[in-house]
Image (spheres, rainbow, N blue to C red):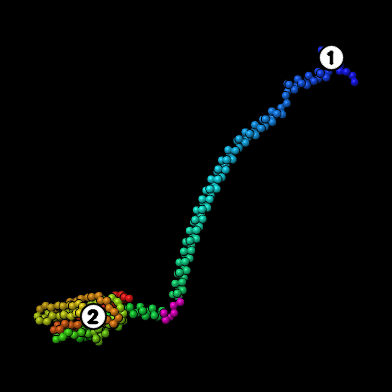
């Protein structure tokens, strides 16, 4: 091998090349580490910019989920209330259907029994003393007498007997009775009658004057048991007058039944 050639200044060619290479590296140093550092810095900056956005998105999503859960609870409550209302309406409807079935299942005999019960509660009568075309005085008598009101206007329930003048209660209840009297004036004789329940005097109607006509009327509500009797009697030594004008009347009717 030939030895390195010398150049001016005493340096061989290999030494010259090595010096040139070292000079070039000093003027243009490697950029690998610098680029790596810049990339790392950019990545850190990117991560630093992205994390706050992710946390905000998560908070917003959490708030939305919480709101939706609250809405779901409200809807569940409304659904339970609606189901409860529907169940109550179903019970009411079932009761109505049951009552309808009970009514529709009534036999003819039961219907007739109900009708009969209503008819039994229809009690009313009204009558005057003189039959049509008659007129005159009744009394005076030395003892009391029961007046028989023979001219019957109304006798629903047939509880009044025009032969005896007695009303007999067909059922327990509250009854209203009224009666009126009429007489001609007399210096010595008054017109006096009274209503009687089971033999006991209850209410008296009295009228007396020396001239012209006299009249009076009374009314009373009585509680009667089945079979109790009510009638009107003329006081002893009293007299009344009646004609086709029906001045003297006796009436009664059931106000309402009692248990």
Q: How many numbered tags mark residues here? A: 2
| Label 2 environment density (alpha carbons within 10 Å; few <14, some 14–19, many ≥20) | some
> Which image quarter: residue 238?
bottom left
Numbered range of the magenta stretch:
105-110
In this image, 127 relative to 114: left or right? left
> Which image quarter: residue 197?
bottom left
| Label 1 environment density (alpha carbons within 10 Å; few <14, some 14–19, many ≥20) | few
Q: Indicate yes or no whether the magenta region holds residue 206.
A: no
Q: What's the residue at 31%, 79% (across, down)?
A: 171
Residue 10 seen in the figure: yes
Identify which residue, 131 or 253, lies in the foreground.
253
User: What residue would you read off at disc 2?
Assistant: 197
The mark that comes first in sequence, 2 or 1, is 1
Element type at mark 2: strand
Instruction: Measure the alpha-carbon separation of dots 2 and 1.
Output: 172 Å
Identify which residue, 80 or 124, lies in the foreground.
80
Q: What's the residue at 76%, 21% (across, down)?
A: 22
Element type at mark 1: loop
Whole-percent x and y of residue 253? 28, 77
User: What residue would you read off at disc 1?
Assistant: 7
Q: What's the residue at 16%, 80% (across, down)?
A: 192
Query: Which quarter shows the C terminus?
Result: bottom left
Whole-percent x and y of residue 67? 52, 48
Q: Is residue 75 above or below residue 248?
A: above
């Amino acid at each position: 091998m030939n030895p390195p050639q010398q150049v001016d200044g005493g340096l061989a060619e290999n030494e010259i090349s090595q010096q040139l290479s070292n000079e070039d590296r000093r003027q243009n140093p490697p950029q690998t580490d610098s680029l790596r550092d810049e990339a790392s810095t950019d990545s850190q900056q990117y991560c630093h910019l992205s994390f706050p956005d992710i946390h905000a998105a998560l908070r917003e999503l959490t708030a939305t989920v919480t709101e939706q859960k609250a809405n779901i609870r409200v809807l569940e409550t409304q659904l339970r209330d609606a189901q409860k209302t529907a169940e109550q309406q179903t019970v009411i409807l079932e009761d109505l259907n049951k009552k309808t079935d009970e009514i529709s299942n009534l036999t003819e005999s039961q219907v007739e029994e109900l009708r009969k019960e209503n008819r039994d509660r229809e009690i009313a009568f009204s009558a005057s003393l003189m039959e049509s075309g008659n007129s005159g005085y009744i009394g005076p008598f030395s003892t009391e007498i029961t007046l028989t009101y023979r001219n019957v206007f109304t006798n629903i329930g047939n509880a009044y007997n025009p032969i005896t003048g007695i009303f007999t209660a067909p059922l327990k209840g509250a009854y209203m009775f009224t009666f009126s009297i009429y007489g001609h004036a007399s210096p010595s004789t008054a017109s006096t009658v009274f209503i009687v329940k089971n033999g006991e005097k209850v209410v008296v109607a009295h009228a007396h004057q020396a001239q012209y006509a006299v009249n009076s009327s009374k009314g009373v509500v009585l509680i009667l048991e089945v079979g109790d009797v009510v009638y009107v009697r003329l006081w002893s030594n009293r007299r009344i007058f009646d004609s086709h004008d029906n001045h003297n009347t006796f009436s009664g009717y059931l106000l309402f039944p009692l248990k």
